[in-house]
Amino acid sequence: MAETLHIKHTTRYSYAAPVTLGSHRLMVRPRDSHDLRLIEATLALSPPGSVRWFHDVFGNSIAVVEFSGPATELVIESDLVIDRYTREAIEGDLDPAAAHYPFVYSADDRADLGRLLERHYPDPKGRVEAWARGFLTDGAADTLALLDAMNRTIKADFAYQARDIEGTQTPLETLDLGSGSCRDFALLMMEGLRCLGIATRFVSGYLYDPALDGAAADGTVGAGATHAWVDVYLPGAGWVEYDPTNGLIGSANLLRVAVARDPAQAVPIAGSFQGRPGDFLGMQVEVHVNRAQNAPGDAPSAAIEPTATATDQNSAATAPQTLIPVASTESAASLAKSPQAAA
């Protein structure tokens, strides 16, 4: 059964004086699949810019925007309507040979998964590996129970803190701090499972919280901003979504936009500008995810191609929910990166 959702993601950059906007790279358009159907997608830009679309190495839909002329404000607004389908129980799909850990991927799977099986971050004293192996008994476990335990433990034992600064904590930093954002928790689970030889990838997208549409609150955190979680590859079941921030597994409330080997490859919006030190005043991000007004049967029958349109600079964004600082320029000729990361 599908649920039709409306996603509005608005980002506004403000500058004290006119600046020259560099190329911007956007990852805001989901890819159609059997579990997520893109009904409508509109990209509004102020000031207007030329847009070029391509697929990256992971198959994500990427927009590269080039602007002309100086500006004191940049507004990027992505408006989506999607159908999200609930996944059936994972147990029935799992290959019996992978039901108990340790299991072995086929030779073809191992070749194709490649670096998604490999650890990416230093762990000189083996602390991340020791933490991951703490979920095993004599080096073994029921596979789904292992994944569920790690997912729930991160939610229970680590304090969620929305963090607006650029970058992702290393797994060791998250273990030391006992806290982090959704992208930090996703990376910790990814590296923990990679220690055990289980393939993972990073997912960037949005989180639907039914409480925003009047349902009873269930403690969901991370809505109102971009969100991040983990895909785990299981033989027979394929890629299965785990959200350690909320303890969710294969939930239809997780709205995938992009997948990557590492969080640094899945930044929703990244770009640059040329100006003087102090020109950058701030960045405001607002994300709304709600049930669409139309019932699924009333939705258009085909996806609408992406468009880029000019919008009124005075009305393209509303009050901010999240403030994300970026690096300041060092000189009049320097370029300041302006990435946006999942909270």
Image (cartoon, rainbow, N blue to C red):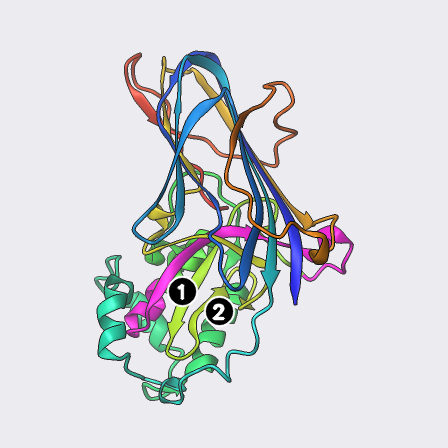
Percent position (x, y) of residue 109? 27, 73
Q: Circle 1 sits in a helix, a strand or a loop, which is it?
A: helix
How far apart marks 1 and 2 lie (CA) works out to 7 Å
Q: Residue at x 40, y 85 (%)?
A: 95
Which quadrant does the N terminus fall into?
bottom right
Left of 194 or right of it: where is 163?
Answer: right
Determine the residue positioned at 55% across, 48% down.
303
Instruction: Please tell me the numbered disc located at residue 151.
Output: 2
Badge 2 element: helix
Q: Residues within 10 Å of mark 1 (few under 14, many from 20)?
A: many
Residue 96 vs 282, above or below: the answer is below
Judge whether residue 211 is colored magenta: yes
On the image, the x and y values in percent for residue 337 come to 35, 29
Q: Is residue 73 left or right of residue 217?
A: left
The residue type indicated by label 1 comes to Met
At 35% from the left edge and 88% from the top edge, which residue is drawn?
97
Count neighbours of disc 2 (C-alpha within 10 A) and say few if under 14, some if 14 to 19, many if 20 or more: many
**Is residue 201 rendered to the left or right of residue 89?**
left
- The magenta region covers 191-218
Q: Nearer the viewer, residue 296 or 144?
A: 296
Say if the magenta span includes residue 153.
no
Is the residue 76 above or below the residue 135 in the image? above
Circles 1, 2 touching at the beta carbon (< 8 Å):
yes
Q: Residue 321 versus residue 205: which sits nearer the camera?
A: 205
Q: Quadrant of residue 96?
A: bottom left
Residue pointed to by mark 1: 189
